[in-house]
Amino acid sequence: MNINHRKNAMAFVAVLLGWFSGISPAQIQPNPASDLPVRYEELSAPDFVRAVGQAEGVCVIPIGILEKHGPHLPLGTDLLTIRETVLRAARREYCVVFPEYYCGQIFEAKHQPGTIAYGTELQWKLLQETCDELGRNGFTRIILANGHGGNGAFLSYFCQAQLATRKPYSVVLFSPGPDTTLEKKLRALRKTTEGGHADEVESSTMMACRPELVHPERANLESGENLGRLDSLPFAYVGIWWYARYPNHYAGDGSNANREIGELVLNSKSAQLATLIKALKADKTIKKLEDRFFDASMQPSQTKQ
């Protein structure tokens, strides 16, 4: 397929996505300026150099996990959906998208088949060295796009810990904000209100990006009810909290999965991520503040109060 045909095909896909989601084609048009792949693994070495420049030093790492998602969704659901979100964003605002990354925190699902729970030290070292290698290859802004709820505290701490030593790159955790238009549309479409894991919304998102892997007819083979087995313990956080609520590693009901819901969610998040990518390309403040901070940290007694 030549470049013009590829661009026409991408434009056609954009129109289809707009039809499914209610977003106008103008809002989701792919970036016509790029003839480079957005996927890291698809770039040749010479094209990689061009891609770093065209991305203005921005690389996104979509982070998922391998864990059970009820009886009806694939083990890689979190990575599959967040990578689709990132790819959609990258086609709107060019950046390089790192390959599949499944190494995160998932100890709470070790009792379920298929879970890969790497040790805490390995989780940290692998992510840090991945960022270091990206920095060595010219990326100056690394975005962590998280698709797995169990990674939240780990990734926030990882970003905070980047202040331990000066680095030639900055790490940013993508933090989607509220979307009132999306929420209104979801309320009108959803048939359930409870959930959080392999539920109606997550199942719908998978249906939008990999429908052949979704089996809604199996969704009611297990319960996604919150058992509340630690509700008698107030004002406390304990690591076993998720298992206490959802021993089936399933929260909600995915039997009502609806592709339209999935398209809405994917397009909303990808639009927010594209906005972040664009803002980071123009940003000069993060690096300036980091340099000032590290300079001051070498002589804290001379820091002006």
Image: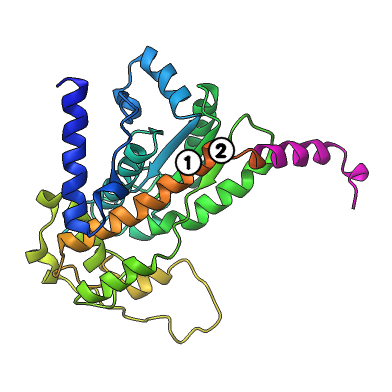
Q: What residue range appears in magenta?
A: 287-305
Measured as percent of width and height from the top left, residue 135 is found at: 54, 27
Q: Nearer the viewer, residue 297 or 60?
A: 60
Measured as percent of width and height from the top left, residue 133 is found at: 50, 26
**Residue 106 magenta-drawn?**
no
Q: Residue at x 58, y 47 (%)?
A: 159
Left or right: residue 130 versus residue 254 is right
The kind of residue tagged 1 is Lys
Q: Please, which residue is most extreme toward the bottom here?
A: 232
Residue of label 2: 282
Mark 1: secondary structure: helix
Q: Please, which residue is most extreme toward the left here?
A: 217
Residue of label 1: 278
Measured as percent of width and height from the top left, residue 119 is found at: 45, 45
Q: Which mark is residue 232?
A: none
Left or right: residue 139 versus residue 189 is right
Mark 2: secondary structure: helix
Is residue 281 depicted above or below 176 in this figure? above
**Residue 291 magenta-drawn?**
yes
Marks 1 and 2 sit apart, C-alpha to C-alpha, by: 7 Å
Q: Is residue 64 visible?
A: yes
**How many discs appear?**
2
Is residue 187 depicted above or below 162 in this figure? below
In the rendered image, the quadrant that contains the N terminus is: top left
Contact, mark 1 vs mark 2 (Cβ under 8 Å) = yes
Q: Nearer the viewer, residue 241 or 200?
A: 200
Q: Residue at x 37, y 74 (%)?
A: 244
Q: Residue at x 50, y 21 (%)?
A: 137
The kind of residue tagged 2 is Ala
Q: Residue at x 23, y 51 (%)?
A: 75
Quarter location, residue 47: top left
